[in-house]
Amino acid sequence: NMPATDHFRYLKSPQDTASVGLVLGVACSYVGKQDTNATKMCVVHIPSMLAPSYSEIEVSSALQCASVVGIGLVHAGSTHRMMTELLVGEINRKPTDKPSHSDREAYALACGFGLGLVCLGVGSDAPGLADLKLDNRLLRLIHGGSEVSLPGSAAGGSRLERA
């Protein structure tokens, strides 16, 4: 078990693989435990979750992908409402560092894996998530159609839905 103080050394490494490995390794250490510190480590690498004053921080698309999968691992099977909304909102968002088509697809796939892990084993019967209409929302993303805002979001869309 690596001390949290050592995490920073790997996260600031110029080697992207070290940061990705650390995020996924920590997430795997807390599968399904909804650990606050592991969640924070993942969320801090998702630019849309940061305050606008931190928008200049560059996070590689590989680290963004690892972070959303990490959220899924840490919250596996929990049907955690906020993490579900976050991942649904992120599926349609582009990673911020490189606007390439393959990065967009990789990020959407990683968000889908994360969402699948959070809702693991519950399907459309997820307690407290029925109003999100996940089945319809995901089918709309697959087949196209107009985007529907998440329940409870403000008129302009929630922080989780802005594109």
Image: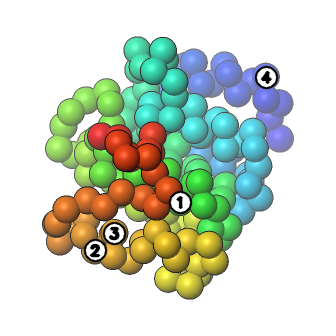
**What amino acid is at disc 4?**
Thr
Instruction: State the separation of the CA atoms marked 1 and 4.
Output: 29 Å
Q: Nearer the viewer, residue 56 or 17?
A: 56
- Residue 148 image point, x, y percent: 31, 61
- The mark lying in front, picked from 4 and 3, is 3
**Crowd band around label 3 with a 10 angstrom C-alpha radius: few (<14), some (14–19), many (20+):** some
Asked if the residues shown at circle 4 and circle 2 are in contact, with their CB atoms under 8 angstroms apart, the answer is no
Rendered image: mark on residue 58 = none
- Residue 66 image point, x, y percent: 49, 44
The residue at 42%/74% (across/down) is 133
User: Secondary structure under badge 4?
Assistant: helix
Query: Which residue is labeled 1 in the image?
Result: 84
Query: Which residue is labeled 3 in the image?
Result: 137
Mark 4 / mark 2, whichever is N-terminal? 4
Work out whether residue 3 can be spotted.
yes
Image quarter hosting the N terminus = top right
Mark 1 / mark 4, whichever is N-terminal? 4
Q: Nearer the viewer, residue 33 or 137?
A: 137
**What amino acid is at disc 1?**
Thr
**What amino acid is at disc 2?**
Leu
Asked if the residues shown at circle 1 and circle 4 are in contact, with their CB atoms under 8 angstroms apart, the answer is no
Query: Which residue is labeled 2 in the image?
Result: 139
Furthest toward the front, the residue is 155
Instruction: State the separation of the CA atoms marked 2 and 3.
Output: 6 Å
Mark 1 / mark 3, whichever is N-terminal? 1
The answer to whether 146 is drawn above or below residue 7 in the figure is below
Rendered image: mark on residue 5 = 4
**What amino acid is at disc 3?**
Arg
Asked if the residues shown at circle 1 and circle 3 are in contact, with their CB atoms under 8 angstroms apart, the answer is no
- Residue 101 image point, x, y percent: 17, 44
- The mark lying in front, picked from 4 and 2, is 2
